[in-house]
Image (cartoon, grey):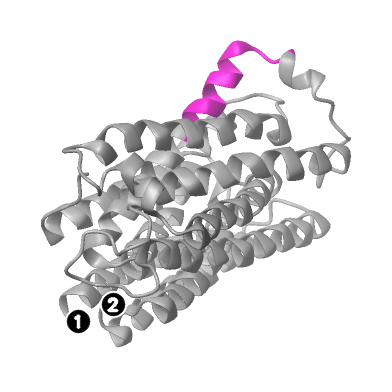
Amino acid sequence: MYVPASFATALLLTVLCTFCWGSFANTFKLTKNYRFELYYWDYGLGIFLVSLGYAFTLGSMGGGHFSFLPNLRQADTIFLFYAALGGFIFNIANVLLVAGIEMVGLAVAFPLSIGIALVEGTALSYLVHPQGSARLLATGVLMALVAVVFIGMAYATRGAESAVSSRKGTMVCLVSGLLMGVFAPLITKATQGSHPDASLMVSAGALSPYSAAVLMTFGAFLCCFVFNPILMRKPLAGAPVSISGYFSAPANYHALGLLGGAIWGTGTVFNFVAARFVGLPISYAIGQASPMIATLWGVLAWHEFRGARRKSWLYLAAMFIAYLLALALIALAYRAR
């Protein structure tokens, strides 16, 4: 299987992951009057299919017992369960994130939800498998949390939505972030095994990054059949929606859902692969700088801060500076280990 051979390559993969994770939601924004509960069926399928594609190509490159199918056969059942459970929990979190995007916009939902997930997921992952400088990693995560505070202040001074809508959207994003932070330590455990050995490409019984991505996205896709119908009957916003709306939707809406899943799934595979070199706490933390990308899309492409006060723009600028500092500190955490 392919894994990066240098820190520079691993860092590039995490940056590409950041771009993918921060960009996928644009595919939903491109649909008009289409419910996210319906969009998510195609999205869930898209992340699973793209992870399979990478597993049978890059993940099977060179053959041997590290490649995708042999790795699945030797993996311990408990690690298969951890990866699938991580995907199941992630799917609930991500559905709530997409709901949050619909309620309060990209520029707000991403930093609030993913900022919380960054702090929680990085800390828990580090406890499972410490790698890199804890001091620099913690400082980087703290700067990311500062960025989340700034985006919240930018939203508060924007004055665009009603107070009721703001509170509900904020709560949805909060729950999304708390749940999303749980999947990272589960994946860390699944890929590191019970007795990690740095000399091995994959520890005995553990999952390769490609196998972990397939199991995680499979768990997320299965979750669609449990959680999506509940939200369709009792939506967070708007009236209940019927599955007939999915089948009557234009073909390009289904294509956009699949594309959104493929974009996010690509970022996930890149993140897991990079983690083989730098460790999942570091690769996850860098990847979760995606709110910076999402906010750029929200501001520049979707004009979510059009007409905002000057103070809001200053807070947005401070958010970008804080996230860039967080990215630099987290990258340095690997070098200082």
Q: Which dot marks residue 337?
A: 1
In the drawing, does residue 271 fall left or right of residue 186? left
The tag on residue 131 is 2
The answer to which of 110 and 129 lies nearer the viewer is: 129
* Residue depicted at x 74% and y 12%: 248
Asked where in the image residue 195 lies, by quadrant, the reply is: bottom left
* Secondary structure under the numbered disc 1 in the rendered image: loop
Looking at the picture, which amino acid does disc 1 mark? Arg
Residue at position x 32%, y 68% from top? Answer: 282
Residue 77 in magenta?
Answer: no
In-front residue for pair 281/36: 281
* Image position of 134 (left or right of 303): left
Q: Is residue 78 visible?
A: yes
Residue 34: image location, x then y, percent: 70, 26
Q: Which quadrant: the C terminus? A: bottom left
Seen at 25% across and 78% down, the residue is 132
Amino acid at circle 2: Gln
Main SS, magenta residues: helix
Distance CA(mark 2)–CA(mark 1): 7 Å
Span of residues in magenta: 248-261
Query: Circle 1: is it few (<14), some (14-19), or many (20+) Cα within 10 Å?
Result: few
Which mark is drawn over residue 290? none
Q: Nearer the viewer, residue 201 or 308?
A: 201
Contact flag, marks 2 and 1 (Cβ < 8 Å): yes
Q: Who comes first in sequence, dot 2 or dot 1?
A: 2
Q: Residue furthest front?
A: 74
Residue at 60% across, 28% down: 42
